[in-house]
Amino acid sequence: MSQSPPQIAQRILDVIPEMCFVVSTERIVLDCNRRARELLGLPDNLMGEVAFYSLLTDDSPRPLLSMLRSRSTSATAEVRFKAGGGMVFDAVLSIGRIKDQEGERLYVFARDISESKQKELDLLRFSNVVHYTVNPIQITDAEGKMVYVNPAFEKASGYTKEELIGCDPNLLSSKKYPKEFWQRIWAVISSGRVWNGEIENRRKNGDPLYTQLLISPIIDNDGKVVGYLGSHRDITEQKQLEQQLMHSQKMESIGTLAAGIAHEVGNPLASISSIVQVLLRTISDDFAKDKLGLVEAQVHRITKIIRDLVDFSRPSNYQIQPTDIVKGLTDAVEIVKMGKKAKEITFITHVRRQAPLLSLVPDQIAQVFINILLNAVDALQGKKGTITSEVERDNDRVRVTITDNGQGISPENLSKIFEPFFTTKPVGEGTGLGLWVSYGIVRSFGGDITLTSTWGQGTSFSILLPLTAKEYGNG
């Protein structure tokens, strides 16, 4: 038995996986396919009683009327259907207008896009989390080229996203790791596994950037690695605090050692000095007297080194008193200007903001200024140059900055500057204790000394002193 054309059309519509509707100009559903009846719980015989808009949620767009009012023969729109059991799903409508002997009707095809909408929502949530997290995030392609960085990564690295996208992450490399180190990491992540470890990179300005890095492969539905997500946790401040703690512990140990050295070496030196004095008074040979004079000079030099060690390793007995920091600095500058090496140097002193009297030991803070100024003079190596000293009140501290345009300090020596007996001067021209002792004096006042230096351009020391200094030697 053959079927009529309407029956054939209905069977074709029933096998279509999308919902299909025939809708009148009054927006009444005249017919629909099996998929629509199953999803929306519609009866087999609609009887012309189901309004199309009754199938939609209250907040869904209603596009049919605008279609009917227009001259267009087709349109698309996005709506939200109410399914059975209170479920809601999104769909894209493809609307067509047909006129025949029976009148004008709309044919509506609805494609369920709930899954893709959910994926879009999940992706939006993920992208927002990644974009606005405080942790630096970078995403690379399968070859390791950066395709995305979040604002936190830009801030931490000092680079803009325009400078980073398309580049290899080794743009930030500190060059401290051998090639084999990176090969091992690549072998782990390219096999689909996660790598986690501590990394030292370099910011755009050259400063170290320490991070705890987790690299997670991005894997597609076929199990293929298509990219990598690198999540950093900035631990630079933590590393700096650890280094400061280690330095403080080292300085404390050396201070304890200094007291023992002073005792063990001081007594024999006193005996040697006494013997030299007796010999100088009892002999008449000029050659012998000359050589004994050299011995005496070296004994005095060693004694001074020991005195510096003792000054650092135990509290001073000098009296704290209100001290004019500006006068102390200008007096120190005048003293250093008299030196032979300072003849070609221009000394400039600025007082940016007048500082109040500070509770300090005047002689010792003057010693600090002189030590740093002498180092600045040596950095200029007898050539023409400028040493600028500035005093400025900075909130609850006074900042004294001494800057030279000399040779600067090489990067490998920066971390050693305040270590005892470290010096870059030739043998016999420096004991390596000046900055060490200065550091101890300033810290005992509750202050700090910091420095910045660019190799070949100059060095700047900043001496920070609190407005109310703590009792010297009590902490």
Image (cartoon, rainbow, N blue to C red):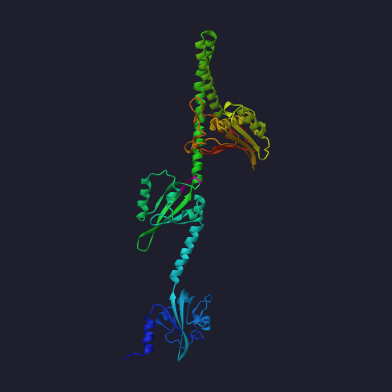
Q: Quadrant of the C terminus?
A: top right
On screen, residue 415 above or below 80: above
Residue at 47% over, 66% down = 121
The x and y percentages for residue 141 are 40, 57
Q: Is residue 134 visible?
A: no
Residue 209 in magenta? yes
The x and y percentages for residue 279 are 52, 10
Residue at 50% over, 60% down = 128
Residue at 51% over, 18% down = 269
On screen, residue 279 above or below 212: above
Q: Quadrant of the N terminus?
A: bottom left
Residue 174 in the figure: left or right of residue 471: left
As rendered, which of 379 and 103 lies closer to the eye?
379
As rendered, which of 387 and 258 lies closer to the eye?
387
Residue extent of the magenta highlight: 205-211
Residue 32 in the figure: left or right of residue 158: left
The x and y percentages for residue 303 are 53, 22
Residue 358 in magenta? no
On screen, residue 264 above or below 155: above
Label count reads: 0
As rendered, which of 91 and 434 lies closer to the eye?
434
The x and y percentages for residue 111 are 43, 76
On screen, residue 274 above or below 454: above
Residue at 53% over, 83% down = 69
Q: Is residue 185 visible?
A: yes
